[in-house]
Amino acid sequence: MINRVVLVGRLTKDPEVRFTPNGVATCRFTVAVNRTFKGQNGETEADFISCVAWRKQAENLANFMKKGSLIGLEGRIQTGSYEGQDGKRVYTTDVVADSIQFLEPKNGTGSSQGASNYESSTNTGGVNKNAPQGNDGGNNNQPSYLRVEDDPFANSKGPMQVSEDDLPF
């Protein structure tokens, strides 16, 4: 079974980070994604997609992006439900972001000259196989672990211990 989502769009408002009772950072946000066709009136239409980020990528999103920022994200669809204040069942659908790319420079001018892409990812266990390798002109601000001796996880013994309280589900 496959549950993968890739989106490129703009944030509809300034992202705000919140923390769970256990201190885990989370950020709920909406991405406006243009449709590939025009509506009956000839104007481009958009879908507004609810998303959630966790931990460091939630903090990075809130610290570096604002309303209108262009981002790319990869994640999965997650559904849920809860009982609303009126006693009726409310159903939810969100994209849980596994990886977020900041696609514009921090100043947000829309100019790509001199801009670099920043990535925040929950996959922190070693080399990002999707990241470009080699000389990128110095624009990659992510660490590049090309040698085993530079890998901070190379000497770890066995699997990482993760507390149930840290899981978003």
Image: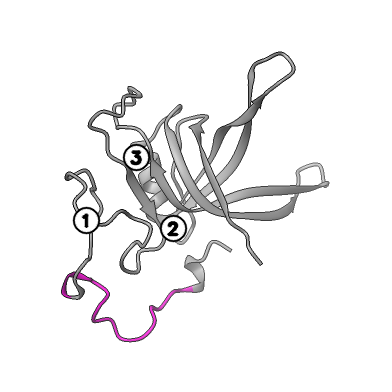
Q: Quadrant of the C terminus?
A: bottom right
Q: Which residue is at the front of the view, 39 or 74?
A: 39
- Which of discs 1 and 2 lies nearer the camera? The answer is 1
Residue 134, which numbered label?
Answer: 1
Q: Which corner quadrant of the image does residue 50 belong to?
A: top right
Q: Is residue 72 left or right of residue 34?
A: left
Mark 2 nearby-residue class (10 Å; few <14, some 14–19, many ≥20): some
Q: Is residue 147 magenta?
A: no
Residue 43, compared with residue 33, is above or below; it is: above
Give the residue number, with chain letter if any, for mark 2: 24
Determine whether the residue tagged by mark 2 lies in a helix, strand or loop.
loop
Q: Earlier in the sequence, mark 3 or mark 2?
A: 2
The residue furthest top is: 41
Label 3, on which residue?
63
Q: Position of residue 83 (x, y in %)?
A: 76, 51
Amino acid type at mark 1: Gly
Separation of disc 1 and disc 2 at Cα? 34 Å
